[in-house]
């Protein structure tokens, strides 16, 4: 069985990508389950919680966003994901104890793949890369920022079936992605306003409420009626139908937004991605089939 395990499953780009991966694999005849600690994903695909996760012989396990120091961490996934396990002292103690309770030899029974979805994952000291059979990167641009020497492969995310919008509004900007300082939401809004956009719609999970109230709320007051918070929207066609332009001032090499803009005839203002990122879903599936050894 293919088992996708993530340290979070609230509505953001990585969760949507993992849901799509799970659905695509199941639709093509492979048994796949997505396990995550939050509830948002539970009705979006074949899914489960960390409490339900078990390793079995022959599994292909795709791990995302989890600090894994030992194979034993998979045997107690809830504890590994929990806030307590993020504490360095507790983490070290658990590593020592778990190696005794769950010998590392269990790693021989399944394939373990690390999915790196950040631009730079090399800084994550709380990962033991030697545990993994392969490292998955979403973009070739990540290779320049990572020093991981394990066997690795590049495969972009599956895309939903999007089509060009028939009747787009004029001068309506979309800011797509979690609302946070890292995504430069404030700068993106300002860029759209400076370009003469009459409406700016924020489509994204409110990842940092403090940042939102300190940086975005003042903008809404200085530009009354122009900035609207729509929150996360999993109806991507409807989202792209509602905007004429998308602004992204930060280099996000893993983002699907440039490809989605191209599919929906939406003007994209941001860092472009290489042509090798524009693979069809069938081409993307063939990469996963080969890397996971699927029949």
Image: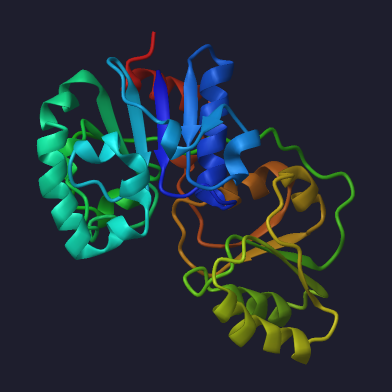
Q: Position of residue 215 (x, y in %)?
A: 60, 85
- Report how many numbered discs are placed on residues in the image: 0
What residue is shown at x 44% (from left), y 54% (from top)?
253
Q: Residue at x 50, y 75 (%)?
A: 181
Residue 13 spot, x, y in % from top left = 55, 50
Query: Which of the pair 127/100 is nearer the observer?
Result: 100
Q: Quadrant of residue 126?
A: bottom left
Drawn side of residue 283 relative to residue 133, left or right: right
Query: Quadrant of the image for the N terminus?
Result: top left
Report the front residue among 190 and 228: 228
Q: Is residue 103 left or right of residue 186?
A: left
Residue at 38% from the left image edge and 54% from the top image edge: 118
| Residue 234 % position (x, y) | 70, 46
In the picture, measured across the screen, residue 257 lies left or right of residue 89, that is right
**Horizontal and vertical percent position of residue 65:** 37, 49
User: Which residue reaches farthest top?
Assistant: 295
User: Is residue 210 something one can see in this rendering?
Assistant: yes
Q: Is residue 2 left or right of residue 15?
A: left
Q: Answer above or below: position of 258 versus 202.
A: above
What is the quadrant of the C terminus in the image?
A: top left
Structure colour scheme: rainbow
Kindly indicate the quadrant of the structure image that contains residue 137: top left
Q: Look at the image and tell me whether residue 150 can be seen.
A: no
Q: Which residue appears at 51% of the width and 32% of the height?
A: 48
């Amino acid at each position: 069985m293919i088992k996708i395990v993530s340290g979070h499953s609230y509505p953001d780009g990585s969760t949507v990508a993992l849901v799509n991966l799970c659905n695509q694999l199941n639709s093509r005849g492979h048994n796949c389950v997505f396990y995550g600690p939050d509830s948002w994903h539970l009705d979006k695909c074949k899914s489960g919680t960390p409490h339900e996760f078990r390793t079995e012989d022959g599994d292909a396990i795709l791990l995302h966003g989890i600090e894994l120091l030992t194979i034993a961490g998979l045997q107690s996934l809830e504890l590994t994901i929990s806030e307590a396990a993020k504490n360095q002292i507790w983490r070290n103690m658990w590593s020592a104890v778990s190696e005794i309770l769950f010998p590392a030899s269990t790693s021989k029974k399944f394939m373990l793949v690390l999915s790196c979805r950040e631009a730079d994952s090399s800084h994550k000291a709380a990962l033991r890369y030697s545990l993994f059979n392969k490292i998955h990167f979403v973009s070739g641009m990540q290779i320049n920022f990572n020093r991981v020497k394990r066997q690795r492969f590049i495969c972009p995310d599956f895309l939903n079936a999007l089509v060009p919008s028939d009747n787009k509004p004029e001068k309506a900007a979309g800011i797509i992605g979690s609302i946070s300082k890292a995504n430069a939401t404030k700068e993106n809004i300002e860029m759209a306003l400076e370009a003469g956009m009459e409406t700016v719609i924020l489509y994204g999970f409110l990842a940092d409420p403090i940042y939102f109230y300190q940086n975005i709320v003042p903008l809404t007051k200085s530009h009354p009626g122009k900035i609207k918070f729509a929150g996360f929207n999993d109806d991507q066609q409807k989202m792209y139908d509602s905007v004429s332009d998308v602004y992204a001032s930060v280099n996000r090499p893993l983002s699907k937004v440039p490809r989605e803009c191209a599919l929906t005839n939406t003007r994209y203002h941001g860092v472009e991605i290489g042509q090798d990122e524009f693979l069809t879903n069938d081409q993307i599936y063939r990469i996963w089939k080969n890397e996971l050894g699927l029949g």
